[in-house]
Amino acid sequence: MATPLPIFVAQLSASVSAINPLVARTAAKHGDKAVANAMKNVPKDTRSLMRSIKRSRPKVGGGSVTVLLSAGGSSSPNDVDYAQYVELGTGRMAARPFMRPAVNHQLPIMEKDLAGLMELLAAGKPGRAAGRL
């Protein structure tokens, strides 16, 4: 016998509330690793740019989890507003990317971790999924 729609919707809602915190923790963990990688590879003339690299807190909403990585900006210590020029280069300076390579390295690892979490949740093992983090 098929599950009645209201029960299915309630089960799906419970699954989403279990999934979001796990995805947010996974995104934060991999965001931290990408930040560490970017800090390792950024040019360190004064170390100001390196110290400006950071990760936002995970934001959950609208069926997604968002984590932002940033470098530089006028609100960072010592007014480090040149991060984009180092990352992308200029007409007079070659690009020395440090953020894109860090993110590109971490994304497939994060996707693999998320797939593993989803498999555990689909198998009805939320405790094991939470324990992986």
Image: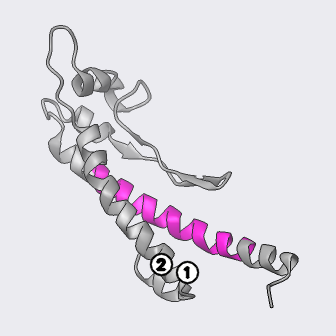
Q: Is residue 4 left or right of residue 97?
A: right
Please state if 77 lies on the left or on the right of 1 as rendered.
Answer: left
Asked whether, in this view, residue 87 is left or right of residue 24, the answer is left
Q: Amino acid at mark 1?
A: Ala
* Residue 46 % position (x, y): 16, 30
Q: Position of residue 72 (x, y in %)?
A: 34, 30
Residue ID for mark 1? 122
Q: How far across and how far down the image is residue 10, in percent?
A: 80, 76
* Front residue of 117 and 78: 117
For mark 1, give the secondary structure. Answer: helix
At 16% from the left and 42% from the top, the residue drawn is 41
Decide: is 131 above or below 74: below
What residue range appears in magenta? Answer: 13-35
Is 16 displayed left or right of 131 in the figure?
right
User: Looking at this rendering, what residue extends furthest in the top direction?
Assistant: 91
Q: Secondary structure at mark 2?
A: helix
Q: Residue at x 22, y 50 (%)?
A: 37
Whether the residues at callouts 2 and 1 have beta carbons within 8 Å, the answer is yes
Q: Residues within 10 Å of mark 1 (few under 14, many from 20)?
A: few
The image position of residue 101, as x and y in percent, is 23, 42
Relative to 65, say whether 120 is above or below: below
Q: Furthest-bottom residue in view?
A: 1
Q: Amino acid at mark 2?
A: Glu
Magenta residues, dominant SS class: helix
Q: Give the vertical position of 31 relative to 113 (above or below).
A: above
Residue topped by disc 2: 119
Observer-nearest of 48 and 54: 54
Per the model, the C-alpha gap separating discs 2 and 1 is 5 Å
- The image quadrant where one finds the N terminus is bottom right
